[in-house]
Image (cartoon, rainbow, N blue to C red):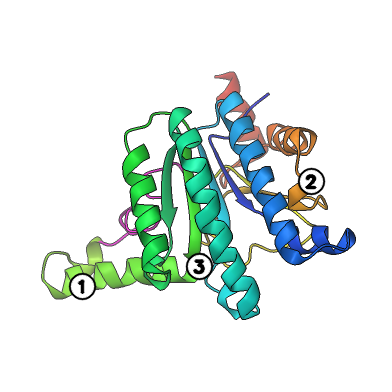
Amino acid sequence: MILPRHLAIIMDGNGRWAKKRHLPRDAGHKAGVEAVRRVIKLCGEHGIEALTLFAFSSENWQRPKQEVNLLMELFMTALQREIKSLHKNKVCLRFIGAREAFSDKLQNLIADAEKLTEHNTGLNLRVAANYGGRWDIVEAAKSLAKQVEQGRLRSEDIDDSLFATHLCLADLPEPDLFIRTSGEKRISNYLLWQLAYTELYFTDVLWPDFDKDAFMHALEFFSNRQRRFGRTGEQVKEEKNA
């Protein structure tokens, strides 16, 4: 089976999972944390190089205040509970997004977790928190514009490759496979630049129910895709046979 090097996931359906069981929404979010643990373990078992998870978007602040507060509390609790296990399993954890919007306590927890795992050589785990794809692109453009203003860069030197180095995830290969759970079929302002040639996989499975079987179905989907990157199918076949 051909495996992706980098897997990106929108973990959707926690609320609906809870509603189906007549439980409060926070029960769904807590069950979602268990699914995160499963997927991290599965990525490690299959030798996947990188996993990027969409934990909290820049648009999620629009949700009811009570739910946002619960998500922040769960975020801190999960980070405190999981970091030692991640470190033990050599996971390198990094966060992408505008973290300055979070409380000082959460920012400190994030910084401590990154420092603890920075030299780990296992799975590269990236958590997108207060992240938006448009924000990512705008921040990169601002960084490049500042360099031009300072005379350190000429505008004509800016190309795709240079621009990409100023985006989040610049240190990783672009995602090969994108997964969104719960039946929604959109990318919701997630990694807009980085998903340009990513294979998109949508499943009706709600995130808390995303188990090994669901994971393997996604990998099988990817393995059966012919990735052409603008070339013809015949060119790809010729290259493989060369």
Give the mark nearer the N terminus: 3 vs 2: 3
Q: Which residue: 73% across, 39% down?
A: 218
Q: Which residue: 34% across, 59% down?
A: 163
Q: Residues within 10 Å of mark 2 (few under 14, many from 20)?
A: some
Q: Is residue 127 magenta?
A: no
Dominant secondary structure of the magenta stretch? loop
Residue type at mark 2? Asp
Judging by the rendered image, the residue that carries numbered circle 1 is: 146
Judging by the rendered image, the residue that carries numbered circle 2 is: 209
Q: Residues within 10 Å of mark 1 (few under 14, many from 20)?
A: few
Residue type at mark 1? Lys
Location of the N terminus by quadrant is top right
Magenta highlight range: 158-173
Secondary element at image label 2: helix
When the figure is inspected, residue 119 is found, relative to residue 183, above or below; the finding is above
Secondary element at image label 1: helix
| Residue 178 image offset from top left, x and y in percent | 63, 49
Judging by the rendered image, the residue that carries numbered circle 3 is: 132
Whether residue 157 appears in this view of the structure is yes
Give the mark nearer the N terminus: 1 vs 3: 3
- In front: label 3 or label 2: 2
